[in-house]
Image (spheres, rainbow, N blue to C red):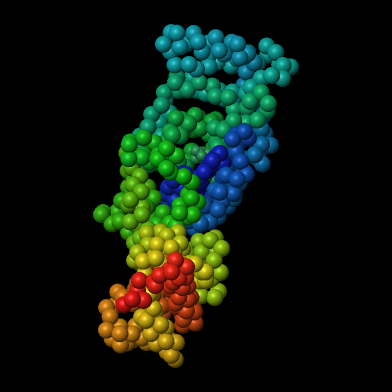
Amino acid sequence: MKIKTRFAPSPTGYLHLGSVRTALYSWLFSRKAGGKFILRIEDTDSERSTQEAIEEIIASMRWLNLDFDEGPYFQTKRFDRYNAVIDKMLLQGTAYKCYCSKVRLDALREKQIINGEKPRYDAYCRDKQYRCPDDPSHVVRFRNPEKGLVIFEDIIRGQIIFNNQELDDLIIRRTDGSPTYNFCVVVDDWDMEISHVIRGEDHISNTPRQINILKSLGAPIPKYAHVSMILGKDGKKLSKRHGIVGVMQYRNDGYLPQTLLNYLVRLGWSHGNQEIFSIDEIQSFFTLDKINKSACTFNSEKLQWLNHYYINHMPAEEVAVYLEWHIINMGIQINNGPQLKDIVKLLRKRCKTLKEMAESCWYFYKDFHNFNATAANKYLQSVAKQPLQTVRDELATISLWTIQNVHDALQDTIDKLGIRMNELGMPLRVAITGCGVSPAIDLTVYTIGKARSVKRIDMALDYIAKKEKSVNDLFTCIGETAPWKNF
Ligand code: GLU
């Protein structure tokens, strides 16, 4: 059997996590079987579909590396084909024109509700097309079998049975001539030779209708797998209310695509107790029947934990490629600073996201003219002058800039002055980073580089001198001696 799956999102908003998980399962299933995977944009709802959403879908697939062999196909470009199939069905009698007015349908519905029946079309026009053949205001309905059952074997859920009496004659073409959603899906799955339809469980009720139409067309019936929902911690369907946004927002927030893929595949699918999977492992272990029938719960802490794991375990060079996007986005030029893979190595233990990493590494690339006021107030004091001056001179004389030589310069400074490392470390950190937080000070100095470090220490010394002078001037102005001059 030729395996072919599809991802068929409707471009009506963000591409959310549930949709991406379905896409991932479809992609994995076809890749593992050596089959094909296609992307089909279901954009028939012209009021809700947007170009922005289409672009977001394609960008998300690219970012996650879910490559497709065909497409993107667009349903709006295939209306001629759908209408040709409908015209043929009209000739064959598997579909019919319905002239029922809205008033009649509303009254029917109301009566059914009052009688405690499920509202459904009563097939009034089924055999009465001759009544007003020239009236253009008609819809076309599918002639659904009146009796019998629709039975299908869902790969995830097992056998599912629907009674045909519960399914009414579905509208397949509207009054304005446009084909309806369920019909387009059927023709597409047929034309595109889809062997396995893997989609959200919210489509289960569409499946018997689609199977009936496929049967009437003499088309093969694909196999179906309906994936369960993702819930928030409160047990409700995951939505914006839970702070959940589109997939690309996860990229913007500093998640790696590897994290998201690993997290999503594991959500509702398992292979023993294994939590971390490379994409190759996922491909070799993945089977549809191991997908959980019940809904699963989204856990943002676990996602963050996994991201931290990937940031720390993926080769630094690979993480650097994704970090670069964030840094460039922040408007930081990276060509006059350390290599990004070194930044990754330096910061990865302390960062859970790449955004955090990008935000805490700017001082390796960007010069600054002001120190963080709180940090400078605390650490750039007169007492720091001598340690800073001494370490500046030590660093300036290093001819071979290595971590060891930088480390030795710092050690020599504290030995020479008989001070503790902290008395040098904190003023030096503020001097060279502009703020009070950085990785180990020797590594930070080393990574910032010699010329930049020396220049920034000079700036800090200048800052201290100016501060002293302004206090001095203030005391001179009120006719006193600055208190420290008395010592
Ligand atoms: N377009 C549908 C959706 O976005 C999917 C339909 C299908 O997979 O059959 O929910």
Q: Is residue 446 above or below residue 340?
A: below
Q: Residue at x 74, y 17 (%)?
A: 134
Q: Quadrant of residue 170?
A: top right
Q: Quadrant of residue 335?
A: bottom right
Q: Residue at x 32, y 36 (%)?
A: 234
Depth check: 481 or 296 in front? 481
Q: Residue at x 59, y 49 (%)?
A: 55
Is residue 285 visible from the viewing direction of this image?
no
Residue most toward the right? 134
Depth check: 106 or 383 in front? 383
Is residue 135 visible from the viewing direction of this image?
yes
Q: Is residue 475 above or below residue 73?
A: below
Q: Residue at x 59, y 10 (%)?
A: 104
Residue 107 picture location, percent across and down: 55, 9
Residue 100 picture location, percent across and down: 62, 14
Depth check: 87 or 345 in front? 345
Residue 231 picture location, percent across and down: 36, 39
Number of residue marks:
0
Residue 141 picture location, percent across and down: 59, 23
Q: Is residue 406 above or below residue 105?
A: below
Q: Quadrant of residue 149?
A: top left
- Quadrant location of the C terminus? bottom left
